[in-house]
Image (cartoon, helix red, strand yellow):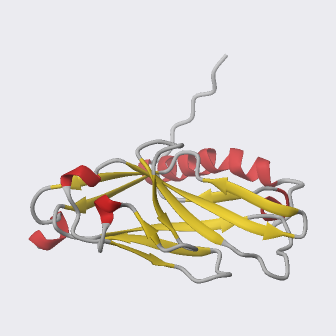
Amino acid sequence: MALLVSLPAGILDMAWVLLLLLPAACLQTGNPAGTYRERYFAVIQPAYLSGVQGGSIEIPFSLYFPWEMAKDPQMRILWRWKHFLGELIYNSSSGFIHEHFKDRLILNWTQPQTYGALAILDLKEEDQTVYFCQVHLNTKSGMQRWQSIGGTQLIITHGEPPWLWL
């Protein structure tokens, strides 16, 4: 048995939006604001970014964790490329920068911020790959380490970006 409803186009669009939002609303029931941050840890990065060869790009990240930081958190941000356990390309505590990225990486982050961005300058075709942010943090429960699972797929294009065509 199916229910057929005839609605004007605008109302039908609104009905689809409400239908799509329904599962999210159901998940929120009984889950007070902030609970995600109290129980889980994550590094949030965009899934995809696009940059123009020769230009630059920033890969933003946000950190979520439930632990209370130690008096000296010794927070470190590391970046890997190509795959989840790929080569290290940046280490905030030692200042290490992979040879491929010499003079082209800038980490816009200061301890104890829970957000920042990795800037890659003078983009090269070989930079097109996946980038993973990893965090090391000394907490009252001991040293914790976690990273983005999916990372950010960087796509390098040739020529001017479309917004410059206007």
Name the residue: 58% across, 83% down. Answer: 110
Residue sitting nearer the eye, 70 or 7: 70
- For residue 71, above or below residue 84: below
Image quarter of residue 30: bottom right
What is the x, y in percent for residue 68? Answer: 86, 72
Q: On the rendered image, what quadrant is the C terminus found in?
A: bottom left
- For residue 140, above or below residue 84: below
What is the x, y in percent for residue 96? Answer: 46, 68
What is the x, y in percent for residue 60? Answer: 48, 68
Name the residue: 53% across, 75% down. Answer: 116
Name the residue: 23% across, 63% down. Answer: 123
Name the residue: 78% across, 48% down. Answer: 26
Q: On the rendered image, what quadrant is the N terminus found in?
A: top right
Q: Quick check: 46 left or right of 67?
A: left
What is the x, y in percent for residue 82? Answer: 40, 44
- For residue 146, above or below residue 164: above
Counting labels gives 0
Image quarter of residue 143: bottom right
Residue sitting nearer the eye, 134 or 49: 134
Q: Quick check: 93 left or right of 60?
A: right
The extreme top residue here reads 1
